[in-house]
Amino acid sequence: MPAVVGFVKIVSTGGGSIVQFGDTVQVSPSSTSKTYAGSGSFLTGSLTNSNNAVSATNSVDPDIQDSTNVPNGVNIV
C-alpha cells in the first residue's frame, strides 16, 4: 500500500540500524548483540521503583550461534 512520507530528520544511526520507508517484505539487520542485565536495570522514567530482595542474572549461554547474520558478500554453503 503506497504511503506519503512528510519531512524526515534522522539524527543518528548505528552500524546495525535499519531505516526503512514504505512497504517491505523482509528487513534483516547486519549485526546482533546480546545484553545481560539484572532485575530493574532498564527502568526509565521519573518515578520508577524496583523492589528486589534477591536478584541474579543468568548469563550462561550454551548456544554455539545465536544469529545467522553474516557479513555482506559472504556466502555460506
Image (spheres, grey):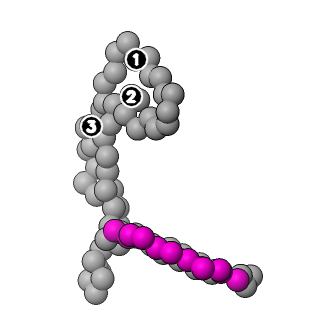
Tag of residue 59 = 3
Q: Nearer the viewer, residue 64 or 58?
A: 58
User: Looking at the rendering, which quadrant does residue 64 occupy?
Assistant: bottom left
| Quadrant in which the C terminus is drawn | bottom left
Badges 2 and 1: C-beta atoms under 8 Å apart?
yes
User: Is residue 18 found left or right of 54 in the rendered image?
Assistant: right
Give how far across and how far down residue 59 sits, in percent: 27, 37
Name the residue beneath numbered marker 2: 39
Q: Which mark is residue 66?
A: none
Q: How many marks?
A: 3
Looking at the image, residue 59 lies above or below residue 33: above
Q: CA distance from mark 2 to mark 1?
A: 7 Å
Residue at screen point 26% across, 44% down: 62
> Which is more toward the observer, 55 or 61?
55
Query: CA gap, disc 3 to disc 2?
Result: 13 Å
- Residue range (magenta): 4-14
- Residue 2, image x, y percentages: 73, 85
At 30% across and 32% down in the image, what residue appears?
Answer: 58
Inspect the magenta stretch and tell me whether residue 11 lies in it.
yes
Q: Residues within 10 Å of mark 3 (few under 14, many from 20)?
A: few
- Residue 68 in view: yes
Can residue 52 be found in the magenta stretch?
no
Q: Nearer the viewer, mark 1 or mark 3?
A: 1
Quadrant of the rendered image containing residue 75: bottom left
From the viewer's perspective, is 14 left or right of 18?
Answer: left
For badge 1, the amino acid type reads Asn
Q: Secondary structure at mark 2?
A: loop
Estimate the x, y position of residue 11 in percent, counting from the top left. 42, 70
Cα distance, mark 1 to mark 3?
Answer: 19 Å
